[in-house]
Amino acid sequence: LEYNMRLIAFGDSWTAGHGVENDVQYKEIATPPLFVSKLREQNSWPRWVAEKFDIPFVNNGECGFGNHYILKKVEDCVENNFIEKTDIVIVVFSYPYRYEKYNEYNVVELYERFENVLKDYNHYYFNAFYPIFNDLTERINLPNYFINPYSSLSYILQVAELEKKENVWEYGSKMVWNDKKNFNEGDYHPNLNGYKIISDYIYEEIKKIEDAKTK
């Protein structure tokens, strides 16, 4: 990798690192004390992915963000020249209906806007806990840098919990068992181990594509 490359991450609480802390009193607080925010930011998956690539990182995840907010943050960073052509940009999409009545675009239009603003940059997409195109009547063709567009990072953790008996959810929760019948977006985050498992997955998927570019 290039010496001046950085990892720039965008997303919601699944990127911001909600759940890294062990103290349950911060469980429902979207804007906790700065100390807790820094604890989350510095120990979420962007840190561990960047460490594997041996590059610096910027965690732009924000608790409570919907995808239109994530888009605006990406646009702001591009407009202000905070992102370099050598950087790896990772966008982890939130629940597509989080603030549905405030959304300016449908999911396809929103994705196209992400593509337009990031077209000149080396970027990757993942879904956090709900595939953004899950409810379309027809699947659309997507580039290889949208990693498993009809799956999610939460699925990776469900496999780790069910098959490997890993403890992956915040505050000792076992979210797999009521996932399908009791979906609750505000009560669904990894713990530190979960973020490290996510980082392994993100790193391996990106590395495969980056390695292919150099061949």
Image: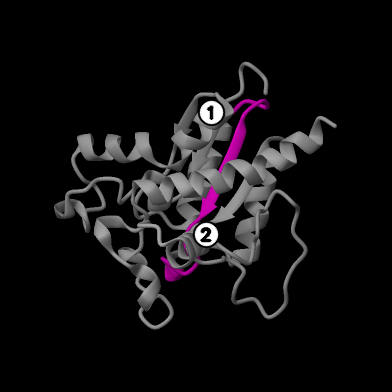
Task: Provide residue 138's location: percent of width, then percent of height.
Answer: 72, 77
State yes or no: residue 71 in magenta.
no
Residue at (30% x, 65% y) in the render: 187
> Quadrant of the image for the N terminus?
top right
Q: Residues within 10 Å of mark 1 (few under 14, many from 20)?
A: few
Task: Give the answer, above or below, for where 67 lies relative to 206.
Answer: below
In the rendered image, which residue does mark 2 sit on? 156
Residue 208 coordinates in the image, percent (x, y):
72, 42
Q: Earlier in the sequence, mark 2 or mark 1?
A: 1
**Near-viewer residue (129 or 160):** 160
What residue is pinned by disc 1?
80
Residue type, label 2:
Ile
Q: Is residue 34 left or right of residue 134?
A: left
Q: How is the image coloured?
A: one colour
Which residue occupies the foreground of this view, 202 or 10? 202
The relative height of residue 203 versus residue 135 in the rendered view (above or below) is above
Residue 96 rendering spot, x and y as whole percentages: 50, 66
Q: Is residue 195 left or right of residue 85?
A: left
Quadrant in the picture for residue 167: bottom left
Write the start and end of the magenta stretch as one range: 83-101
